[in-house]
Image (tube, helix red, strand yellow):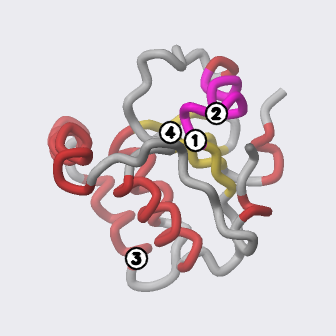
């Protein structure tokens, strides 16, 4: 049984500086504290991926588990945006663009994220204030 019964879970690359920044960005703009988080590399993240039928050893994308379904790449990012406060929730309207185009942009950024933003030696450690939002 997944932990998603009490809200969406965002699985992210825990060693990616851009991903860690994105998690902090989401937390600051999630007024209802809807989202919970786990790194893809964590035991919890790997378990949740497996429960969704995804291979934890080959996932290189943010994954949003919402309403019992796993969303990846641009679908995941846009579904996150729809829950954020204004003006960030306006990005949800980009869901009408063809997925192949949205995902191509997503993959371009994902391929270059370490080069552009760097990589941590270990997974990010949430601050004490953020800790309750993390599953691992």
Which span is picked out in magenta?
39-49
Residue 51, picture quadrant = top right
Residue 43 among magenta residues: yes
Q: What residue lies at 35% left-to-right and 57% top-to-bottom?
A: 18
From the viewer's perspective, is residue 4 above or below residue 91? above
From the viewer's perspective, is residue 71 above or below residue 8? above
Q: What residue lies at 50% left-to-right and 44% top-to-bottom?
A: 14
Determine the CA span between mark 1 and mark 4: 10 Å
Residue under pointer 2: 42
Mark 4 or 2, closer to the camera:
2
Q: Where in the figure is residue 39, as x and y percent of width and height?
A: 58, 41
**Circles 1, 3 touching at the beta carbon (< 8 Å):** no
Determine the CA span between mark 3 and mark 4: 19 Å
Determine the CA span between mark 2 and mark 3: 28 Å
Category of crowding for the residue at label 2, using alpha-carbon neighbours closer than 10 angstroms: few (below 14), some (14–19), many (at least 20)? some
Residue under pointer 4: 63
Marked residue nearer the N-terminal end (1 or 4): 1
Category of crowding for the residue at label 4, using alpha-carbon neighbours closer than 10 angstroms: few (below 14), some (14–19), many (at least 20)? many
Q: Nearer the viewer, residue 99 or 48?
A: 48
Category of crowding for the residue at label 1, using alpha-carbon neighbours closer than 10 angstroms: few (below 14), some (14–19), many (at least 20)? many
- The residue furthest front is 121
Mark 2 or 3, closer to the camera:
2
Disc ID at residue 88: 3
From the viewer's perspective, is residue 76 above or below residue 58? below
Q: Secondary structure at mark 2?
A: loop
Determine the CA span between mark 1 and mark 3: 23 Å
Q: Secondary structure at mark 1?
A: strand
Mark 1 or 4, closer to the camera:
1
Mark 3 or 4, closer to the camera:
4
Residue under pointer 1: 39
């Amino acid at each position: 049984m997944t932990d998603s019964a009490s809200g969406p879970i965002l699985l992210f690359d825990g060693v990616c500086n851009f991903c860690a920044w994105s998690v902090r960005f989401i937390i600051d703009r999630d007024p209802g504290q809807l989202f919970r988080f786990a790194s893809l590399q964590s035991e919890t993240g790997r378990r949740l991926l497996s429960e969704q039928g995804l291979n934890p050893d080959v996932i290189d994308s943010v994954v949003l588990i919402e309403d019992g379904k796993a969303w990846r790449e641009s679908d995941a990012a846009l579904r996150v945006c729809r829950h954020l406060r204004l003006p960030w929730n306006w990005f949800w309207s980009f869901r009408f663009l063809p997925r192949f185009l949205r995902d191509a942009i997503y993959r371009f950024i994902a391929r270059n994220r370490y080069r552009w933003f760097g990589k941590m030696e270990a997974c990010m450690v949430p601050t004490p204030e953020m800790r309750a939002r993390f599953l691992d």
